[in-house]
Amino acid sequence: MGSKNLKAIAVQGTHKVEVADTEGFAALARESSKILGDAMYHLRDSGTSLYVDVGIMFNDMPIKYFQETEFEADGLSAATMKGFLTGRTACYSCPIGCGRVVSLPEFGMDRVAGPEFQTIAAFGTGLMIPDLRKVSLMSYTCNQYGMDTISCGSTISFATHLCDLGKLDWGLEWNDPERVVELIHEIGNRTGVGDELGEGSMRLAQKHNVPELALHVKGMEIPNHDPRAFAGMAAVYAVASRGATHLEGDMYSVDMGVDVREVGIYSGDRLENEGKGETAARAQDFRAFFDSSIMCHFALVPPQTLIDLLNRATGASYSIEDILRIGARAVTMKRLFNLKCGLTGADDNLPKPLLHPLPDYATDDFAPDIELQLNDYYDYRGWDRATGVPSAKALKELGLEGLTSP
Ligand code: SF4
């Protein structure tokens, strides 16, 4: 879409959506909604910024382009946001309502979307800026340009890191919020150094002959969960279809204790490589189904409830095995698409700086063993260890034998 300058596709229909069991569906939806709303009160109360304290505690929240382990983050917390919170928002019909509305008259911001955890990490701890009001301005400015805050914050962090190393002479410094806001405008307008930054970390690194230093997978910047704090994120980032994303498998959450035993997703030792590839694959399959059913990842209703809702809506009789298979088919079809576009197993990787432990023995000197995790992942899926290509047998088992690998 980007190469064709296509921003969005809007679809509109005229037919009514038929529900097989209207009353049964509505009753279960009401009941689930109530349980979900009660269970997730903390997310409604604090928004995703509640994870700032947790992320810092687990060394999961990247600091200074994933280089440091200590940062005073009180100024970025959910409690700090309450000082300028002026409302809350929810997606359609959601009983949780994690969205924040903030007002900062000093920046001309009146009841605008507040920053989410990922944005707070990208511009706050990532760039060593302990000021949530200024981070909110950065978030708002990115939103005005329609720019992703993770990629934008990470690319500016990378450029600052390169200035530190003497590889760039742009004079960028950590904790320089005014310059960061200027840079966001420069990126949005493709002026000054913003023209180069607007190409993202991978191309910036290629241009300055430091490809090994950029933290990205398949050209997309690493989001703000550190695979040295939650090992399974290594496999997730390496194999995710659109590059490093935390949205194709939430292993940070699984290994914090949010397992889904009904579908074989068990929490394990967060600093252990063994078995993480298979668990990451299961988490991916489950989340791929979740996405297809248009459920928010925060709305973690029990799988059987989700299936009951689906069956009452469609009149079908899906089982737990079926939903995992549906997820696996989606993941596999995306893999085949990528292979046809020229990606190979060699693109399933993690940048080298993340394959070394965090400093200060912060996570017991743990480092992801990406080869071990990938072999485990490929074996579970029946993909070739050397090439990452799905075997004919694996495709047949998913009913995808009509789709060929290259
Ligand atoms: S659907 Fe998800 S993102 Fe939207 S308000 Fe509810 S919990 Fe938040």
Image (spheres, rainbow, N blue to C red):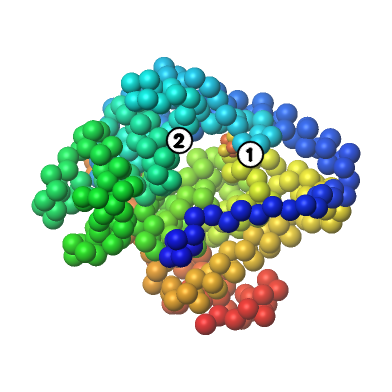
Q: Answer yes or no: disc 1 within 8 Å of ligand 1.
A: yes
Say which of 341 and 65 sits in front.
341
Q: Answer yes or no: disc 2 within 8 Å of ligand 1.
A: no
Q: Residues within 10 Å of mark 2 (few under 14, many from 20)?
A: many
Q: Residue at x 60, y 32 (%)?
A: 90
Task: Name the mark nearer the viewer: 1 or 2.
Answer: 2
Q: Position of residue 48 (x, y in %)?
A: 49, 33
Q: Is residue 290 visible?
A: yes
Query: Which quadrant of the picture is home to ligand 1?
Result: top right
Amino acid type indicated by mark 2: Glu
Q: Secondary structure at mark 1?
A: loop
Q: Residue at x 61, y 53 (%)?
A: 10
Using the image, determine if residue 297 lies above or below residue 350: above
Looking at the rendered structure, which numbered label has been put on residue 347? Answer: none
In the picture of the structure, the residue carrying the numbered disc 1 is 299
Q: Position of residue 287 (x, y in %)?
A: 60, 52
Q: Secondary structure at mark 2?
A: loop
Left or right placement of residue 246 versus residue 265 in this view: left
Left or right placement of residue 161 versus residue 305 in this view: left
Q: Quadrant of residue 94?
A: top right
Left or right placement of residue 117 versus residue 405 in this view: left
Amino acid type indicated by mark 1: Ala
Q: Position of residue 25 (x, y in %)?
A: 83, 41
